[in-house]
Amino acid sequence: MGNLWSNWPMGGFANELIIFAGWSFAIMAFIIWSLVWKGMALWKSARDDSRVWFVVFLVIHTAGILEILYIYFFSKMSKDIRHKN
């Protein structure tokens, strides 16, 4: 009898569909990751009245890297500078 998919003309299509589903999941996870960090950075830069950072985050897509740097490093530096004056 053999493999059920071996005689079916679209057996290769089933494998391609499984691969596509895996890539689709990875792409969706990447999009969600990016949107979460972008949203948090946009919110924080708007609350800190950092207009330049807000525009940078809005225009440039960095997969969350620049947003993470802003949230954990640059926003704290700007707060320290403001409190010293």
Image: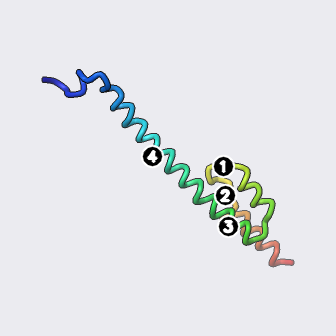
Q: In the rendered image, which residue does mark 1 sit on?
A: 62
Residue 76: x percent and y percent? 72, 69
Q: Find the distance from the CA under tag 1 to the CA under tag 2.
A: 8 Å
What kind of element bears circle 3?
helix
Find residue 34 and name its label.
none
Residue 51: x percent and y percent? 80, 63
Categorize mark 2 by other alpha carbons within 10 Å: few (<14), some (14-19), many (20+): many
Q: Find the distance from the CA under tag 1 to the CA under tag 3.
A: 17 Å
The amino acid type found where label 1 is placed reads: Thr
Instruction: Please say if 1 is above or below 58.
Output: above
Question: Which quarter of the rendering shows the N terminus?
Answer: top left
Residue 12: x percent and y percent? 34, 26
The amino acid type found where label 3 is placed reads: Trp
Q: Judge left or right: residue 62 versus residue 49.
A: left
Q: In the rendered image, which residue does mark 2 sit on?
A: 67
Categorize mark 4 by other alpha carbons within 10 Å: few (<14), some (14-19), many (20+): few
Which numbered disc flags the more N-terminal residue, 4 or 1? 4
- Mark 1–mark 3 CB contact (< 8 Å): no
Find residue 43 and name its label.
3
- Mark 4–mark 2 CB contact (< 8 Å): no
Q: Judge left or right: residue 64 versus residue 84.
A: left
Of tags 2 and 3, the one toward the viewer is 3
View extreme (left): residue: 1
- Mark 2–mark 3 CB contact (< 8 Å): no
